[in-house]
Image (spheres, rainbow, N blue to C red):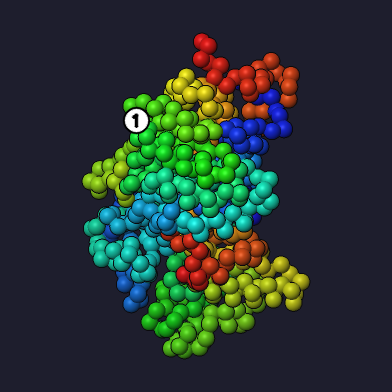
Amino acid sequence: MVRIEKTDKVTAGGVELRNHMILAAGILGTTGASLNRILNLGAGGVITKSIGPEPKTGHHGPTVCVLDGAVMNAMGLPNPSSNFVSELDAIEDIGSKPVIASIFGGNPEDFSKVASWFAGRVRGFELNVSCPHAEGYGAQIGCNPDLVYDCTKAAVKAAGGLPVWVKLTPNVTDITASAKSAERAGASAVVAINTVKAMRISTELRRPMLGNGTGGLSGPAVFPIAVRCVWDLYEAVKIPIIGCGGVMTADNVVEMMMAGASAVEIGSGVLGLSGVNIFKDIAAELYADAGEGKDTVKAEDIIGCAHEY
Amino acid sequence: MNTERNEKNGRNNGSLKAIPSEIVRITRVIDETPSVKTFEFDKDFEFKAGQFCMVWVPGVDEIPMGLSAANAITVQKVGEATEALFKLNAGDKIGIKAPLGNGFSIGNGGRVLAIAGGVGAAPLRPLVRSGRCTTFLLGSRTASEILYGDELAQGTDLRIATDDGTKGHHGFVTDLMKEVDLLSYNSICVCGPEIMMRGVLRLLKEKSEDTNTDLVSRGQFSLVRYMKCGVGICGSCCLDPEGLRVCRDGPVFAGDIVEKSREFGTYSRDASGSRTMPGGH
């Protein structure tokens, strides 16, 4: 398989990472201690649980259904709001760590307020304008390119020079519209994709499997959808793209990069056979010393390379 | 206990396996005490004592619950979901994801001491049923709240303490630890309110220092935390300061791991992830 030349540092979307694999938002990111653990287990960077303007308890359970090859969830953006800021104290030497705060809100003012809590504490922001099952938040903003522009603009202003990434929803006719808005508003990268709208019904109970009724799908089943979105975005925007959705293996990372991703996020992958060791297991397979094997390439040489087919 | 190694199930090949919620029918509801009921259902799950399940109460919520038998959970009414569960009868359906987490690890032999407070006896009962438990120290608020009393007395050397003195020793279950030779047990399995488990850990520490024997790591503590997913992906149940997940890396943790947890017996987190006091559940 294609392997990537080991380098001391990886930069994507203005954030200096330790490798190309970042812990996705909403996964093991509720506490600072957990984020610290995932960094110690080899993640290239970590993204916090999405934090909003007010504390939220989230939807009633079941909130997560693990299916064969996919995970379906409807958490409902549970978060402790400003109480989360002190969680970051649990991350050892946070100044030198690639920690990104995921934030959400219902309007530009919310984004500005929440971003201001974290400016100076983290290395960058990821705007969640793409959660498919939170009334008034998430995808309700991400589906409207004008709102994406306003919220991104507000966050960029409040971020005090830190990079702002915008995580996009695939649940739109044309994912590039919101991406172009984010780019115009000053985003440093776009992240694709958040979960795909989904639903399952328990036939025995004659009711939806999720407490919220409907939810979002992630995991290997959505990988082809994510690759396609990254592909489309690569042709539409100049800012870097972070690939997210069903990445489980080193070869999946290479494939995302060939579609146009500068780095990837891993979420549902922590439920695979490697468990929370997925970051170091992928790194062990993905990276090689220069000249080690004929298929060892520089990362920058394969980002988007498949577009020349 | 190396939890990273425990999690490793094989080489990462990109696969992700389903963890289904099996829909089961309740076959019998047993009134154990005025505040505790056991729900038996029509399916047996293969499990190890201390492992738990996520119980889907349709239309209400999904909550973690220790398995008290291959086909049963024993429940105390503490909130919305358990209250709804208490209204269910034989014939009603619920969903069960099981087995989840790591149970008690008692090796192939040796003497086992179980220490429980209140409904904490539930995940320890399978140890007694399989004939693995030598001595059982059971604490309860009052005589009528003693869980599985007769059953435990048949299989083990059962000693009881009640807060109000209505049965057994008048005082705490930790007092009973002074009656037994702690050094003679290979495993000390504990489940109950966190304040009680903290007392057990403190006594194990004192005894370890007095005797120059590591009793702390012979202790195994079954922890409870607010859980959303139950399968190790959401992070709502992570412990400070190591970030271990109670649902996947636990719920049973060795004493030396628990000793390092600054939140044990002190605080926990609620549904939003905010810290709440106190940690006693």
Looking at the picture, does residue A297 appear above or below residue A54? above
Q: Does any portion of residue A22 appear in the rendered image? A: yes
Instruction: Sort mark 1 into few (<14), some (14-19) or many (20+) by Cα contacts within 10 Å.
Output: some
- Chain under disc 1: A
Camera-side residue of B159 and A47:
A47
- Judge from the rendering whether residue A132 lies leftward or rightward of residue A294; answer left or right: left
Looking at the picture, does residue A18 appear above or below residue B156? above
Residue located at (47% from left, 84% from top): B162
Res A199 → quadrant = top left
Camera-side residue of A185 and B48:
A185
Residue under label 1: A172
**Residue B12: x percent and y percent?**
56, 34
Residue located at (61% from left, 49% from top): A120
Residue located at (63% from left, 45% from top): A39
Camera-side residue of A158 and A274:
A158
Q: Amino acid at mark 1?
A: Val
**Residue B50: x percent and y percent?**
50, 60
Q: Say which quadrant the N terminus of chain B sits in.
A: bottom right
- Judge from the rendering whether residue A33 lies leftward or rightward of residue B74; answer left or right: right
- Judge from the rendering whether residue B255 lies leftward or rightward of residue B128; answer left or right: right
Q: Does any portion of residue B155 appear in the rendered image? A: no
Residue most extreme to the top: A309
Res A88 → quadrant = bottom right
Looking at the picture, does residue A191 appear above or below residue B266? above
Residue located at (50% from left, 83% from top): B161
**Residue A173: x percent and y percent?**
33, 27
